[in-house]
Image: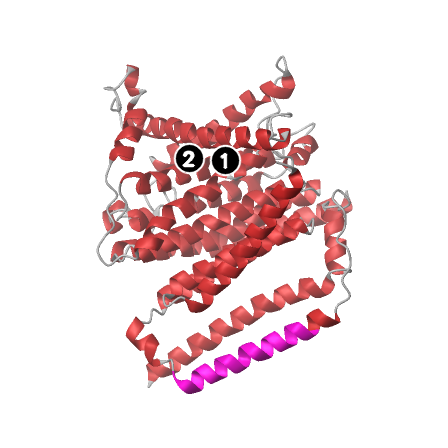
């Protein structure tokens, strides 16, 4: 078996992981399974980063999304467990419509970004410099935006947590 | 078949074999050391001084029935042990056992190891949730709260060393300790790392997640046979990983008194240091009583993290000045 075919198989394996994981995450009735699906999709994405010759980003994907974000979601599920009957009540036509609108809007924005991007070739293997100094410099200058966006995700997670607990506290007081 | 692929397959087999062997050696060591600390002989029946006991135990566990409790989520319940075991094997792939005994040499091997060990927490969460058992759930809560908080001082203490070497490559860090071990210049970081490592691997005196007297067995209460063994193997593999990172970053890795064929025999010094640290871990477990949960959290947030941060700051200033 040649290298090319093996690499191709791996590539499609990652694609399948992402699509299957995302489908599980969206369709699963059990929240815990949905998070597992999300984790699988994240693993697939980190695999794709390997194809872009960026093992650092791939590992960060695992460390941050699988190791931190997914764990936080699971923790949230365990603390605020909703029985299935109660969860089923939340499925109303209004909510479905809103969810559909939000997803379509997200898709539209992403599609807009994708269609306007000018794609460039990834850096060749071995061209990367992963020493701490080079990394820090790249993060602060060239990849400054990506770096800041990652922190925004964490910020949103923190604010969300505060908001959720705030609501629960008020409800408890009533 | 390309030679590189063949090499990978051989390496995978070796690594998995090593994980099993390590669990057997450590299991034997733990039972024997605990016995001698408590002034009893310990394992004596199977083989000379009970040396084959763990092998027999392994066969017993393989033969046992896998019981899935009623009301448990079957799929996730079965998935959890595998999810716990698989990532624990991967750090061995980048481990520098000697100058030339490393399966894959990576520039960012330290991050690779940290990423892989972070997956273990999710396996514990899945196991505890899927078991549908209150002891499992409580054990899981404690385990995750503990692992998430102790990860912070652990990473901060590792960062102090990274600042000095400015590389994430494990071989590079060993090479930087040419004249002295980093434990001499970073003693505080080493102590903080080792304590956090004890907590990360759920070892006594921080074994709250599996406190027998309160929680039966914590998150793996409902697991039997190979399900339990996978958690057991993963725990011992994790202990080895934690101690080998300490060895590489603070104790000079495979460096020692030069032996013939030094590029390969460095593994002797590496193993000696790692198992020395593992012995200390076992020693601590059978010496100190378990801490209370609030003490555990206070210790992490009020003592370890400030000290680790101060250490990091001082290191950063000194590195800049010198």
Residue receiving disc 2: B281
Give the x, y percent position of residue B109.
62, 41
In the image, residue A38 lies at what x, y percent? 49, 61
Q: How far across and how far down the image is residue B299, in percent?
A: 44, 52
Please name the colour scheme applied to the rendered image.
secondary structure
Residue at mark 2: chain: B
Q: Nearer the viewer, residue B116 or B305?
A: B116
In screen coordinates, is B23 left or right of A70?
Answer: left
Give the magenta-colored segment's residue range. Answer: A92-112
Q: Position of residue A166 (x, y in %)?
A: 44, 78
What distance separates the C-alpha of mark 1 from that of mark 2?
9 Å
Instruction: Tell me whether marks 1 and 2 sit on the same chain.
Output: yes
Say which mark, if any, is on residue A55: none
Of marks 1 and 2, which one's residue comes earlier in the chain?
1
Q: Residues within 10 Å of mark 1 (few under 14, many from 20)?
A: many
Is residue B9 in the magenta section? no
On screen, residue B101 above or below B165:
above
Q: Is residue B25 above or below residue B233?
A: above
In the rendered structure, the answer to whether residue A109 lies left or right of residue A90 reads: right
Residue B36 visible somewhere in the drawing? no
Tag 1–tag 2 contact (CB < 8 Å): yes
Q: In the structure shown, which secondary structural element does the residue marked by tag 2 occupy?
A: helix
Q: Which residue is mark 1?
A: B243
Q: Secondary structure at mark 1?
A: helix
**Residue A111 highlighted magenta (yes or no):** yes
Query: Could you tell me which quadrant the N terminus of chain B lies in?
Result: top right
Nearer mark to the viewer, of 1 and 2: 1
């Amino acid at each position: 078996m040649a290298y090319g075919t093996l690499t191709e198989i791996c590539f499609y394996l990652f694609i399948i992981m992402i699509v299957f994981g995302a489908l599980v995450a969206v369709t699963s009735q059990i929240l815990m399974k949905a998070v597992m699906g999300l984790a699988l999709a994240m693993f697939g994405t980190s695999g794709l980063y390997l194809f872009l010759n960026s093992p650092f980003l791939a590992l960060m994907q695992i460390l941050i999304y699988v190791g931190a974000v997914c764990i936080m979601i699971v923790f949230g599920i365990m603390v605020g467990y909703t029985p299935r009957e109660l969860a089923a009540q939340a499925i109303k036509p209004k909510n479905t419509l809103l969810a559909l609108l939000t997803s379509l809007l997200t898709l539209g924005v992403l599609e807009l970004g994708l269609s306007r991007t000018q794609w460039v070739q990834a850096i060749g293997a071995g061209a990367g410099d992963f020493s701490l100094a080079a990394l820090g410099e790249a993060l602060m200058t060239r990849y400054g935006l990506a770096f800041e966006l990652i922190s925004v995700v964490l910020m949103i997670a923190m604010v969300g947590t505060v908001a959720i607990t705030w609501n629960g506290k008020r409800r408890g007081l009533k | 078949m390309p030679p590189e692929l063949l090499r990978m397959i051989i390496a995978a087999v070796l690594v998995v074999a090593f994980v099993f062997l390590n669990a057997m050696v450590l299991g034997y060591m733990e039972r024997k050391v605990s016995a001698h600390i408590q002034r009893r002989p310990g394992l004596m029946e199977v083989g000379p001084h009970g040396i084959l006991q763990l092998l027999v135990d392994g066969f017993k566990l393989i033969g046992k029935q896998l019981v899935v409790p009623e009301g448990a989520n079957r799929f996730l319940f079965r998935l959890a042990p595998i999810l716990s075991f698989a990532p624990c094997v991967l750090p061995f792939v980048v481990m520098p056992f000697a100058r030339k005994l490393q399966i894959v040499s990576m520039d960012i091997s330290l991050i690779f190891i940290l990423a892989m060990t972070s997956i273990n927490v999710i396996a514990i969460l899945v196991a505890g949730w899927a078991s549908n058992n209150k002891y499992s759930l409580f054990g899981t809560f404690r385990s995750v709260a503990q692992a998430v908080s102790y990860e912070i001082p652990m990473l901060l203490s590792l960062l102090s060393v990274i600042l000095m070497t400015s590389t994430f490559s494990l071989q590079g860090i060993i090479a930087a300790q040419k004249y002295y071990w980093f434990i001499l210049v970073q003693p505080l970081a080493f102590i903080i790392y080792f304590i956090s490592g004890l907590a990360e691997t759920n070892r006594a005196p921080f074994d709250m997640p599996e406190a027998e007297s309160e929680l039966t067995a914590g998150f793996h209460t409902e697991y039997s046979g190979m399900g339990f063994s996978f958690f057991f193997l993963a725990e011992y593999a994790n202990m080895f990983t934690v101690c080998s990172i300490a060895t590489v970053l603070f104790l000079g890795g495979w460096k020692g008194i030069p032996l013939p064929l030094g590029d390969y025999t460095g593994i002797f010094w590496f193993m000696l240091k790692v198992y020395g640290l593992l012995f200390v871990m076992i020693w601590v477990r059978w010496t100190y009583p378990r801490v209370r949960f609030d003490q555990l959290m206070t210790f992490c947030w009020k003592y370890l993290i400030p000290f680790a941060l101060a250490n990091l700051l001082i290191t950063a200033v000194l590195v800049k000045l010198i």
